[in-house]
Image (cartoon, rainbow, N blue to C red):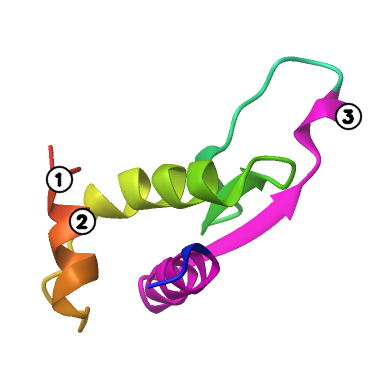
Amino acid sequence: MRPDNLYNELKTIAEKLGIAVKEHNLRNAGIHVTSGLCRVKDQDLFVMDKRLPIREKTENLAECLGRQNLDNVYIVPAIREMLDKYKG
């Protein structure tokens, strides 16, 4: 699977879990921040640094999703195997 397709598939899985994925330029924040999951007004939000290479975006999002309960979400086997690496 192409890296951009993989990243988009992970974003779709996040949406199914109720996690919105937003990309922002985190270098303009004025403080050192990194991509990650947060909660804003009872909404789970994954803030992604849009300047990261697609590979790093995919790894960051996969790490977050791997820690979520994925039992009730259909995920193609190749992606589920990747996410299982991040189960903690």
Q: How many residues crowd around disc 2 within 10 Å: few (fewer than 14), some, or many (20 or more)?
A: some
Where are the magenta residues, as a range? 4-29
Assign a secondary structure to mark 1: loop
Residue at 20% in and 80% down: 76
From the image, tell me which residue sits under label 2: 82
Q: How many residues crowd around disc 1 within 10 Å: few (fewer than 14), some, or many (20 or more)?
A: few
Residue 32 lies, in percent from the top left, at 71, 15
Q: Amino acid at mark 3?
A: Asn
* Residue 28, label in figure: 3
Residue at 48% in and 64% down: 7
- Tell me the quarter of the image containing the C terminus: top left
Q: Amino acid at mark 1?
A: Lys
- Residue contact at pointers 3 and 1, CB within 8 angstroms: no
Q: Amino acid at mark 2?
A: Met
* Residue 4, label in figure: none
Image-based side of 62 in relation to 8, left or right: left
From the image, tell me which residue sits under label 1: 85
Residue at 31% in and 55% down: 65
- Tell me the quarter of the image containing the N terminus: bottom left
* CA distance separating discs 3 and 1: 32 Å
